[in-house]
Amino acid sequence: MTSLPNLAEIQSLEEALHLPEIRRSREAEALLADGFVEFGASGSVYDRATIIDLLAEESGGDYGDLRTSNYTLMPISNDAVLLTYETERSYRDGSKRRVLRSSVWKHDGGRWQMFFHQGTVRA
């Protein structure tokens, strides 16, 4: 049985994927499990290979300031947890985008990796 992580540990892994320097590096690839799937806030579905390619292609453009809040962590099995939280991105034009997010993190015997992620835009 895997020892379940605390919220701070999984939150730290999740937030690493928010950082441009991690997103465009091999570190992001190491954080995504084989079989990873994302249901994007755009409504698109992405597999692991597609996400890795998209992250590698990201420019250093201005994506606005990202704030996160309301993190919760729930065990779903002996080796998996569900992380939920909210993001708010503020853009230079004054607009904001709020998204409810959920991620399933699975322990592969050696490390925690994201197995599933979903973003749902909030009105």
Image (tube, grey):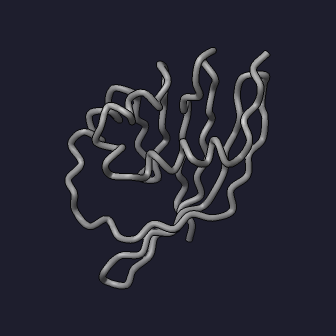
User: Relative to 85, is 95 above or below?
Assistant: below
The quadrant of the picture occupied by the N terminus is top right
Name the residue nearer the viewer: 52 or 107. 107
What's the residue at 28%, 42% (across, down)? 24
The quadrant of the picture occupied by the C terminus is bottom right
Q: Quadrant of residue 53?
A: top left
Name the residue nearer the viewer: 10 or 39. 10
User: Relative to 85, is 13 above or below?
Assistant: above
Pinpoint residue 82: horizontal percent, then vertical percent: 69, 39
Q: Quadrant of residue 46?
A: top left
Q: Residue furthest bottom?
A: 94
Q: Is residue 11 left or right of residue 75?
A: left
What's the residue at 48%, 37% (across, down)? 38
Pinpoint residue 22: horizontal percent, then vertical percent: 36, 44
Q: Is residue 28 left or right of residue 117?
A: left
Q: Is residue 97 left or right of residue 26?
A: right
Pinpoint residue 120: horizontal percent, then vertical percent: 55, 55
